[in-house]
Amino acid sequence: MTTRHSRLPKRVAIVGGGISGIACLWGLRDSDYEVHLYEAEDRLGGHANSVPFHGNGTVRDVDTGFVILNEESYPHFGAFIKAHGVDTIATDMSFSVSDSDGFRQWGSASFWGFVGCFSNLFRPWFWRLVFDIVRFNYFATDIVHEKPKCGKSDELESIGEYLTRQQYSPQFKRYYLIPMVAAPWCLDPEEAARTFPAETLIRFMSRHRLLDTLTHKLQWRSFGNGSKTYIDAFVRGLQKEHHLHLGITVQRITRNPDSRVSIITGTGVEESFDHVVLAVHAEIALQMLGDEVSAEEDDVLGAFETSRTVCVLHSDETVLPKRPSARVSWNCILRSPHSCRDDFHSVTRPPRMTSDGSGFSVTYDMNRLQAIPSPGEEGSPGRVLVTMNPMTAPCQARSWHLYHHPKITSKSVQALKRLHLLKSGGNVSFAGAWMGYGFHEDGFVAGLQVAKEIIGGDRDPLADARTTEEEWRPTWILYLVRGIVRVVQGLIAWRENGIALVGRAGSLK
């Protein structure tokens, strides 16, 4: 005999309204589950946070967290926004690195933007930088075929250790590769060099065609009217069995003897569900589990950390590079080695707006990234900039925002191999961008995978999106370039060793 309870639809709770929670809810759209999504903030989206920018009688929604994507690297998220009829626009993904005092500056928007000044063409310092860029692009993937190298305490070799072992120049580390790691992952450069596993980074760069920039250019895209357009479209398409609970904090969850799971909110309300998905950062999931965390969950979840990043929406152009040709879409500013720390005034922030960054900031030119008319153009709201972890307080600040981003460390990379242990939790699942590289696509795939598991499927949503680690190049060109680079590398080593020997001989006189 069928009881009334067995005929009721199963209830699923999703805790977290970021990209993983959204993906999980969307993945359950064709099921007969009653789904409740809880989000502590009063909005959905997480890093997809568009803020109104008013100026000159116009208003534009400006992204302050998640800004760009491309179709090659974001196949599942791209399919999701297309399914919701959300359009994106082509954008300029140029990059620059500058010392805070303007001593060294380069930008990728043009040849002369990279060279900086004519005299650099006659400086060995500059050509060593160029050589190391070419060398890294052609030889970095060799690490995939090496025996894994661990440093102290069996930690994976960091990118800083790798660059030192391979004798890359200081200028390549400081002004090129390390900022390219620190900027997208919201890390302090010193921390990035010390903790980011080299092989993981190089695999990521190869898979996302970042080692192929001379022969292949990714088409980056953004949301012209802000990423809230996809959030709004998603909410409009919600099914009646799907319920949003915004501004509701979930304090903890408890596993009940009847195989159900209860969530307890900040106001003390308790709700019971057949399945709970913790679509939050790993450390928050641990807090919610409390004393009920299993040994496997504690081991895996405890390996993941997050960084705190402050972003400020403003119009202050003084935070941009001093040289106009170095002003591009992503502007990385390094604390100059010639500057005293006291030269930088402490940044006055709203309460709780503290970040982990210190000697590094990134300013995003939103006029370029979202195709917002620049000052002087028709319909322009003015200069629109977003600065991550500002070293000095920008003037004309409109709003401040705090984000948490997954850190990629030796512990987290090794813990990824043990994610399957989390499935032993039965009716409690986990999802988050921390299960991948920490980006929107990773969070979306993680949430979608949990939805598939709940409804009875175990197909890997990444199966159709795998790409080869290294793009094929004509063999004779590859060998020619590698041969030339090896010869030049030998000459550089001979020259530097000769100078060092002369210096030591002179010191003995």
Image (spheres, rainbow, N blue to C red):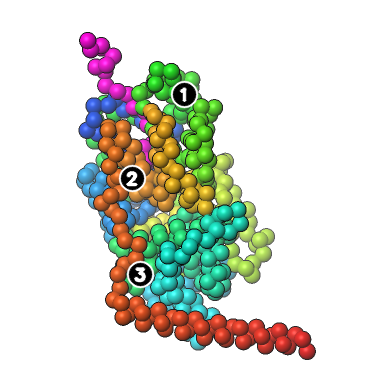
Label 1 to label 3: alpha-carbon separation: 50 Å
Q: Amino acid at mark 3?
A: Thr
Q: Earlier in the sequence, mark 2 or mark 1?
A: 1
Measuring from the top left, give residue 509's x and y in whole percent. Answer: 78, 89
Depth check: give the residue in front, 307 or 473: 473
SS at badge 3: loop
Mark 1: few/some/many CA within 10 Å (<14, 14-19, 20+): some
SS at badge 2: helix
Mark 2: few/some/many CA within 10 Å (<14, 14-19, 20+): many
SS at badge 1: strand
Which span of residues is magenta-colored?
1-22
Which residue does the image show at 48% across and 36% down from the upper left?
297
Measuring from the top left, give residue 9's x and y in whole percent. Answer: 27, 21
- Please identify the quarter of the rendering in which residue 261 is found: top left
Asked if the stretch drawn in magenta spans residue 163, the answer is: no
Label 2 to label 1: alpha-carbon separation: 26 Å
Q: Amino acid at mark 2?
A: Val
Q: Amino acid at mark 1?
A: Thr
| Quarter of the figure with the N terminus | top left
Q: Nearer the viewer, mark 3 or mark 2?
A: 2
Confirm whether residue 34 shows in the render. Answer: yes
Give left or right: position of 137 versus 377: right
Give left or right: position of 70 versus 30: right
Q: Are marks 2 and 1 in contact (CB under 8 Å)?
A: no
Asked if the stretch drawn in magenta spans residue 8, the answer is: yes
Circle 3 is placed at which residue position? 213
Q: Can you tell which mark lies on residue 445?
A: 2
